[in-house]
Amino acid sequence: MLFQEFRRNMFTLGCFTSNQVYSLQPGFDKNNLGRWVRQGYLVKLRNGYYSFPEYLNDRDFAFFLANRIYRPSYISLHTALAFYGLIPESVIQITSVSTLKTVTFENRFGTYTYQTLQPKLMFGYDTRALPGNRTLLFATPEKALLDLLYLYPFYNSKQGMEALRLDPESLHEGLNVDLFKTYAAQAGSKALETRCMLFLKTYGL
């Protein structure tokens, strides 16, 4: 198969798996994928997942991939907190949470890290629209913060909370305290709920 024909059939998917290729094109030679990656026609995202280099110029596409290459997952933690302006530093990695095991993938679009949540904690995210009729699962500010306090339990003192270096002004403007308390109670962990209340007290919320 010629690459141009393959590209016409697969490009609009943005991200695709080798299994999708075999399903849509029976008899496809799997060696083509490796050869096209070496030639720069395709970008390998992780084992069995691919995209096209043209998408490297699309700023939102790297976020879009986060949900696609490891499922179920949604963007949370430092990436979400930086997006909402709650932490001042820029974040290099794209951080997500998932019910699957903790893992990191590196590819030409960036570094993707996924940390494990219990299934009962997979809530508190929105579906965001992206250009090209694509969508993205993204934590609310309240859930991104809850996920952080859940996954990093050593933030359990006033000094620890201050070490998070969250922006107090942005917290007062952008955090729904009542929703955060609701999420904390919904998590069903007294220890986590205690840390959440300490966080609110530390930042005067």
Image: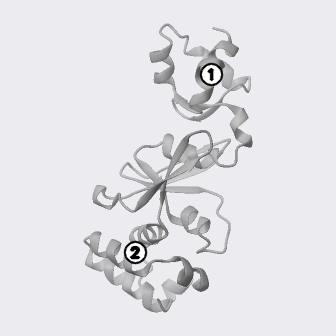
Q: How many marks?
A: 2
Badge 2: few (under 14), some or many (20 or more) residues near its Cα, within 10 Å?
few
Distance Cα–Cα, label 2 vs label 1? 42 Å
**In this picture, residue 185 sits left or right of residue 95:** left
Q: Nearer the viewer, residue 159 or 43?
A: 43
Pointer 2 residue: 153
Q: Residue at x 56, y 81 (%)?
A: 173
Q: Residue at x 51, y 49 (%)?
A: 136
Could you say where residue 25 lies in the image, as x and y percent from the top left? 51, 12
Q: Is residue 33 above or below residue 82?
A: above
Pointer 1 residue: 34
**In this picture, residue 135 sits left or right of residue 198:** right
Mark on residue 144?
A: none
User: Where is residue 169, by image quadrant?
Assistant: bottom right
Q: Is residue 133 above or below residue 140?
A: above
Element type where label 1 sits in the image: helix
Dot 1 amino acid type:
Gly
Q: Residue at x 56, y 40 (%)?
A: 133
Could you say where residue 164 lies in the image, as x and y percent from the top left? 55, 79
Element type where label 2 sits in the image: loop
Q: In what quadrant of the picture does the N terminus appear?
A: top right
